[in-house]
Image (tube, coloured by chain):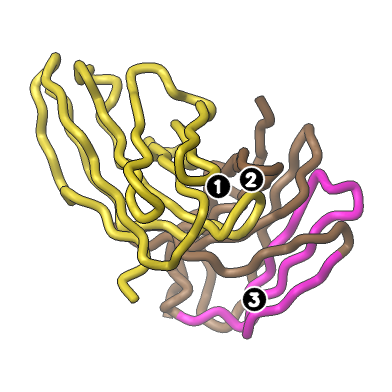
Amino acid sequence: GQQLNQSPQSMFIQEGEDVSMNCTSSSIFNTWLWYKQEPGEGPVLLIALYKAGELTSNGRLTAQFGITRKDSFLNISASIPSDVGIYFCAGQLNNDMRFGAGTRLTVKP
Amino acid sequence: NAGVTQTPKFQVLKTGQSMTLQCAQDMNHNSMYWYRQDPGMGLRLIYYSASEGTTDKGEVPNGYNVSRLNKREFSLRLESAAPSQTSVYFCASSEGNGRDQYFGPGTRLLVL
């Protein structure tokens, strides 16, 4: 099946810094999604991308659907302590959704 | 709107026991999904139901069965639990095929 490679696995940053993470796949997807998960909770949808090349923002978050349909990135600008959590990318083709292994973000005040 | 709800939140089973995980959504979504999440890994799809009355296997269906009871409810059954099924199970729903999925809070299952 399709495999998603998400990097980096973890990040330790200072409050106020920008963050960038990405996902690549060996197969194409119709939709790319980015989720955030906090301890003891389910993933929460942050951004959904539906078209190759699409660039979408949600507050301080910006994500792009790669032109090849095999990759996506998520940027977080001016990080704050509440950005802490695990960020997952997901590629979706019809009802089949595959997830990356996650990027664990730690923000030091 | 409660969104997606799951019961129970925690469960401990002995090897060979059976149990059913319940999931309900109040968003009038057509599609529902069951995933498992293991340490250091992303979520993996077990089964999904594209619409009421249909179910299909996902990436890791072995050892599980599902029932789409009605449009709101989608249950996951472990007939004979094994330690390899120790995991956190998430239910999700979406408006339909290829639409954004919304997740429940998860059920933490330990099989001894």
* Closest to the observer, B27 or A99: B27
Disc 2 vs disc 1: Cβ atoms closer than 8 Å?
Answer: yes
Query: What amino acid does circle 2 point to?
Result: Gln
Could you tell me how far apart the alpha carbons at marks 2 and 1 are, in whole angstroms?
7 Å
Q: Residue at x 20, y 35 (%)?
A: B20
Picture quarter with the C terminus of chain B: top left
Q: Position of residue A100 (x, y in %)?
A: 58, 43
N-terminal label among 2 and 3: 2
Q: Few, some or many C-alpha atoms within 10 Å of disc 1 (few <14, some 14-19, many ≥20)?
A: some
Relative to residue A52, is residue B83 drawn left or right? left
Location of residue B100 by image quarter: bottom right
Q: Chain of mark 1?
A: A
Q: Secondary structure at mark 3?
A: strand
> What segment carries the magenta color?
A54-80
Q: Which mark is residue A6?
A: 2
Could you tell me how far apart the alpha carbons at marks 2 and 3 are, in whole angstroms?
17 Å
Q: Which residue is mark 3?
A: A61
Could you tell me how far apart the alpha carbons at marks 3 and 1 are, in whole angstroms?
19 Å
Disc 3 vs disc 1: Cβ atoms closer than 8 Å?
Answer: no
Q: Residue at x 61, y 83 (%)?
A: A78
Asked if both marks, 2 and 3, belong to the same chain, the answer given is yes
Q: Residue at x 40, y 17 (%)?
A: B62
Q: Position of residue B5 (x, y in %)?
A: 28, 59
Query: What amino acid does circle 1 point to?
Result: Gln
Image height check: is B16 above or below B87?
above
Q: Colour of chain A?
A: brown
* Closest to the observer, B21 or A90: B21
Q: Residue at x 71, y 73 (%)?
A: A62
Q: Secondary structure at mark 2?
A: strand
Q: Colour of chain B?
A: yellow
Marks 2, 1: nearer the viewer: 2
